Image (cartoon, rainbow, N blue to C red):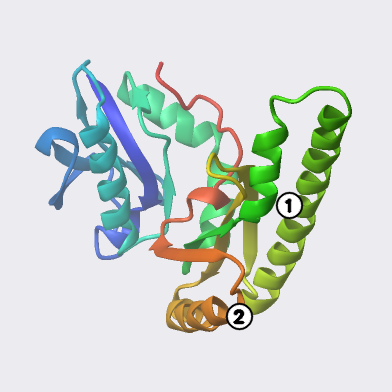
Amino acid sequence: MAWYAYCIAEQKAFLSGTRARRPFSIPSITGIDGSQVFGYPSGDFAVIVSNYTEGTLDQKAALDHARVISECFRTSTVLPFRFGTVFQTEDAIRRAVRTNRKALMDSVNHLRGKAEMHLKLVIRDGAVRENIQAALASSIGGAYLTEIRERAALQRDRQTKAKSLSVQVHRLFNPLDEEVSCKKVDSGGLLIDIAHLIDNASVEKYQNRYVAASRQLKDCQIALSGPWPPYHFLPGKLKGVGNS
């Protein structure tokens, strides 16, 4: 029988501090397509799974996947699996945990009592500058060189703003850890994705800092979500974990 895997959690969170030797049901949570969810025990860990029959894992399944992880996160430190992770046998589950036990234990110890907050910041380019670029896009000769210089200058300006803004945000929020990515958006400008790792007890303080930051960062759009399970702060690629 194949098992669909949602996350790894601390077994004691579901069994009032005791440890099971066999898979135990978690009746308060339903999985993909309403399936029953189980904890598959392995030492201090429980791999949160449900029975899986080959089929299409669609958008609703992705939402169910995230929901199960979030519900487990309410009571336990969790290490989420990537959407679509399937173990074909119970022995495959045991091997995956046994092979990666040290990395999993280190990660759980590091992430215990912590949550992820997610910031999205959009820096818009000046409309006049973008219009100049559009007008020059079909030109040739000297105007084409002007366009190249304009594009290079705009890119440097974006990078400078993004770096400065990232430093400013870090100082404002002072997270325990962070992951930052930056990409150009179709409408012009840059989208900066920032994941912050914070203590659970600091969520309200973090939200208050967000309100203050929204007032200070007037040249960009900023949006906040969370607290989330620590998706961006998980161990690297785990051995024996995948659709096999």
Residue at the spot of label 2: 216
**Disc 2 packing (10 Å; few <14; some 14–19; many ≥20):** few
Which quadrant would the N terminus be assigned to in this image? Answer: top left
Residue 230 drawn above or below residue 133:
below
Q: Nearer the viewer, residue 154 or 161?
A: 154
Which residue is found at the position 56% from the left and 78% from the top?
Answer: 213
Residue 140 drawn above or below residue 217:
above
On screen, residue 94 versus residue 71, left or right, reads: right
On screen, residue 183 versus residue 223, left or right, reads: right
Sequence-first tag of 1 and 2: 1
Q: Secondary structure at mark 1?
A: helix
- Numbered circle sitting on residue 55: none
Q: Position of residue 76 (x, y in %)?
A: 36, 61
Q: Quadrant of residue 2?
A: top left
Residue 6 drawn above or below residue 3:
below
Which residue is found at the position 52% from the left and 76% from the top?
Answer: 214
Instruction: Give the Cα distance between marks 1 and 2.
Output: 19 Å
- Numbered circle sitting on residue 158: 1
Q: Position of residue 62 (x, y in %)?
A: 29, 36
Q: Quadrant of residue 61?
A: top left
Which residue is found at the position 62% from the left and 69% from the top?
Answer: 219
On screen, residue 178 versus residue 91, left or right, reads: right
Kindly identify the amino acid type of the residue bearing the numbered disc 2: Gln
**Disc 1 packing (10 Å; few <14; some 14–19; many ≥20):** some
Q: Position of residue 33 (x, y in %)?
A: 13, 34
Q: Is residue 113 something one can see in this rendering?
A: yes
Kindly identify the amino acid type of the residue bearing the numbered disc 1: Arg
Which residue is found at the position 34% from the left and 25% from the top?
Answer: 86
Q: Are marks 1 and 2 in contact (CB under 8 Å)?
A: no
Q: Is residue 22 something one can see in this rendering?
A: no
Residue 89 drawn above or below residue 61:
above
